[in-house]
Each structure stands twice: as structure tokens, then as C-alpha cells.
Image (cartoon, grey):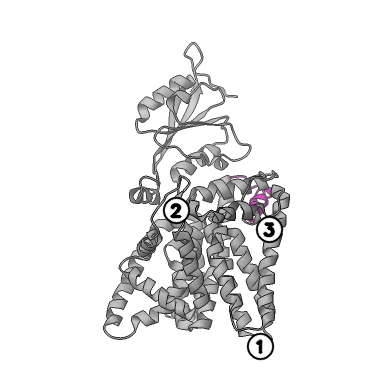
Amino acid sequence: MARLRSAAAARPLVALLVLGGLLRGLAAIFSQGFLASDDHHVLVGAADQLAGGLALPITYQRSILYPGAVAAIMATARAAGLQDPGVEMLLVRLAQAAYSLFAIYFVFRILERAVGRDTAVVGGMLTAAFFAMPVTAVHQLEEVVCQVPLLAAFRWWQRAEDGGHGSQPNAWALLAGVALGLALLLRLPLIGFVIPFTVLVLLRPVAPLRRIAFITGLATVIVLQGYSNVAVNHQWGYTFIQRLGPMLRPHDLALDAGGYPSSPPWHYVFTLLAAFVPPFSVLFLAAAVQGARRLPILGLATAGFFVAHSLVANKQERFLLPVVPVLLLLGAAGLPWIAGGGAWPRAYRGLWRYFWVVNGVLLVVLTFSFAKKDRVAPLLYIYRRHDATGVAVAQYNQTFHVPEYYLGRPRPPLFVWQAREQAVADARVNYVVLYSDQPEPDREQLADALRSELTLLTVIPPSLADRLAHAINPRHNKARTAMIFRATPIDSSGTRTSARP
């Protein structure tokens, strides 16, 4: 143990990357499923199409960059003979776990250059082990994937500002612009961060050529995205028009949430106070304000992000994920100010220990929890039996988009029934997944409608994380039990049909 501590003290960045890699690796293995609708139905669905050789619909509004990268992993797995969708997604999660380690690297380097190594270790530790980081890093959320290029943009601009000593500052400025452009493509609502970031960079007292290089890098990415829209959508800049066009109607954005959760402007403040473990969160956010004074580009760009998102009616907690590493960075930069002087040190140390205890509990729960287990696990169970000729999903106590990707390929016919009268006899259905508050009467009703005997195979309950999410917000987070039945047809004489097509 002493030797490990000595090695970690000598090479703290390596130790932080190992810790972060371990936590993300565990999350990749155990945190299956998806966290939000966009996590699966937008990204994974598009990637599955591309991997299968199908073109995206011309109405696809996002950049092809992220689904294209995931599709490449899927296509490689399929070429190697790995057809199981669960294994395929494990490979995607592992790849994203490795990619997300760059966030730890950039946070450490930014703080090391701006504040010092001790503060860099604190920031790196928070980025590696804050309870929300490992689990979100391995899921297919554009709000998380954009974190790495966002941090890279600032780190590389730091290097551009350093200049001299053969560091090629113009090249670093160009790379910073490219990284900021990639972050924007991955998550277009980052425009509230990108605009003030760009303005502040252009106001920096550096050689004009560096500012030109930065703008060139940013503009190059935007132009290339515009041309990629020609191939996918047959319209130059379609992604920007569709995704950023509503910004031209700010009144509508402020009042109409489009059917999504709507909250007052101060909602995100309370979200952060809850996320960073109260009452420690009060001190941490105060530290982040102090850190923003030391790193004004990041501080003011983050403020712009919050103002823009707070004025929009549609408010979801995951929308804050792009700037979570930045907040961890800024908070770490300001913590020495919070900890110093007067009677604060003892209270600060107590709250700091309290934070890590609570964070550790949350980290374990989320890292080892199967998200949306009641929706994903039944389809994987059926796929792995390798005999599905048709699958019916009876949603009698909740309604949702079925993640049919997990039925594999070739995909059996899928029937989704949200009302009992929709169930009809169909010889192709040999599996039924039932969500019901009265399972026995509904099983009998389905058996009669399908003219089949329904044999219970297994019951899949929601995961602990799904139960907690339901307890916190039962209106938007459902946690139900899924029952899987094998359907065996009964002929007109009442005899079971032994063979299935």
C-alpha cells in the first residue's frame, strides 16, 4: 500500500487515469441499458441503421459524426461474428469509457497550468470519481461525448497563449478552434457556451494570427458539417437550420416546452445544489464562482451556457452534463479559497469527508445498476433464446418506445399493444412481454386473444437505480416489472400445437 501511495504521489495523473479507467470499466460492464430516450432511440437507432448499410432519413437533424463512430464499432463487431446486441453495446460502452479518460487528462492539465499540481489532483479526482461521471461516460449521450472536445478546446488555447519555445502556438490555436467546433456539432445547444468562449478568445491579448487560426479551425468544422448535410439531408446546413433555427424565436422557447418537462428559470440552480451533495454543494458552487475568476474564459462561457438553458422552458437534468467537468474544474480551482482562513478549515474538512462518503454510495449504486432494465433485459432474454418468430409487447401499465434493437438481426416481427383490445391472434407471435398491474387477468385475456397457451418463463424487475429514479420523479421516470411468456398456439380442438414455423 505504501508503495502504491508513493507511485501515485510521483505520477498523480497516471494514478487518476487508472482510477477513472477502473470506475468507467466497471460502469461499462455493469451499467447496461440506456439512461434517456435520446441515449438509445436517437443515437443507437441511427448507428444501427448505418452499421446495417442503410442511409439515415433525410429528416435526421443531428450530425452524423457521433452515430457514425458508434456504427463503426458495431460494424467491426458484426464483421468479427459478434451478433449479440448486448455484447455489441458492451464494446461501444468500453470504447466510450476509454475515450472519456481524456476528460480527466484535460482537467488535470488545465488546472496544473492555471493553479498548480495540488489543485490539479483534486480536480482530476473529482472528474474521475464524481458519482455522475463514470456512468454517464459509458452511455450514448451527446451531452457527455461533447465534454472531451470542449475541455480540449480550452487546454489547447492555453497552449496557444503560452507561445514560444517551439510550441507552435498557431497550430494549437487552430486545434482549439477545431475542438470547439466538434463539441458544437456533438451538442448544438452548446451554442450558449461556444459564442462567449469565442468572443473572449478573440479579445485575448495575443498575436492576431493566433486568433485567425482559432476562427479558421472553428469555421472549417462548421463548413464541413454543412457539406455533410448535403449528403444526408440534401440541404446545406440542414442540421444548423433545424436545431438552431428555433433560437430565432426566443419567445416560443421560453414559454413552450414542447411536451417535455417545464420548470422556472432557477430550476438548474437547485439541480446543481442537489447534484453536488448538500450542504457541501453550497460551498462547492461558491468555490466554482471563485474559480471562474481565475479562469475567466471558462467561467463566463459557463455562465452563458446557464443563462441560455435557464431561459428555455424545456429543462431536463441531463442538459447540464456538457459543463459538469468544467464545474468540477472551476470548483477545484476555488476550493483553496474556501478552505483557507478563520474557523473554516475544520468545518471544510468535515464537509469534504461527508461529500466523499455520500458520493461513494451514489457511485456504487449507479455504477452497478442496469438502466431501463425492465425494457432492455426482456428483449435480450428473448434474443438469446434464438427462436423468436414474433414478439408482442403488452404495455398495460406504462407506454414507451420499445428498444427493438435488442431483438438483434434478423429482427422478428414486433407488435406493441397499449390497449387490451389491440391484442389479436397472430401465428407469428411466440413470445409475449407483459407490463401489467393485474398480470393474471391480463395473461388470460392475452391467451384468449392469441388463442395460445402462455407459459411464464421469467419475471424481470426494475433495477435499483430505476426504482430510485421513479421515487424521485414518478411522473417522468417509470419503473415496472416485465413478465415474459412463451406463446404456444392451441388449435380449434383445444390441442396445443407442438411445432412453430
In screen coordinates, is 184 left or right of 10?
Answer: right
Answer whether residue 248 is visible to the viewer in this image: yes
Q: Which of marks 1 and 2 is in front?
A: 2
Q: In this view, does 497 lie above or below 322?
A: above
Q: Nearer the viewer, mark 3 or mark 1?
A: 3
Identity of the residue drawn at 34% across and 51% down: 472
Choose the circle earlier in sequence order: 3 or 1.
1
The spot of residue 213 in percent (x, y) is 69, 75
Whole-Å distance between the Cαs marked 2 and 3?
28 Å
Range of magenta residues: 68-84
Whole-Å distance between the Cαs marked 1 and 2?
47 Å
Q: Looking at this view, is 185 or 280 the one in front? A: 185
Q: Residue furthest bottom?
A: 165
Choose the circle earlier in sequence order: 2 or 3.
3
Q: Which residue lies furthest to the left in this view?
A: 343
Instruction: Give the residue pinned by disc 1.
Output: 164
Identity of the residue drawn at 36% across and 27% down: 440
Whole-Å distance between the Cαs marked 3 and 1?
33 Å
Identity of the residue drawn at 55% across and 73% down: 106
The spot of residue 281 in percent (x, y) is 35, 68
Choose the circle earlier in sequence order: 1 or 2.
1
Instruction: Give the residue pinned by disc 2.
Output: 313
Q: Tell me whether circle 3 and circle 1 mark residues in contact (CB < 8 Å).
A: no
Q: Is residue 255 magenta?
A: no
Give neighbour class at mark 1: few <14, some 14-19, many 20+ (Cα, 10 Å).
few
Q: Which residue lies furthest to the top in this view?
A: 493
Q: Is residue 83 above or below residue 428?
A: below
The type of residue carrying mark 2 is Ala
The type of residue carrying mark 3 is Gln
Give neighbour class at mark 2: few <14, some 14-19, many 20+ (Cα, 10 Å).
many
Instruction: Give the residue pinned by disc 3.
Output: 225
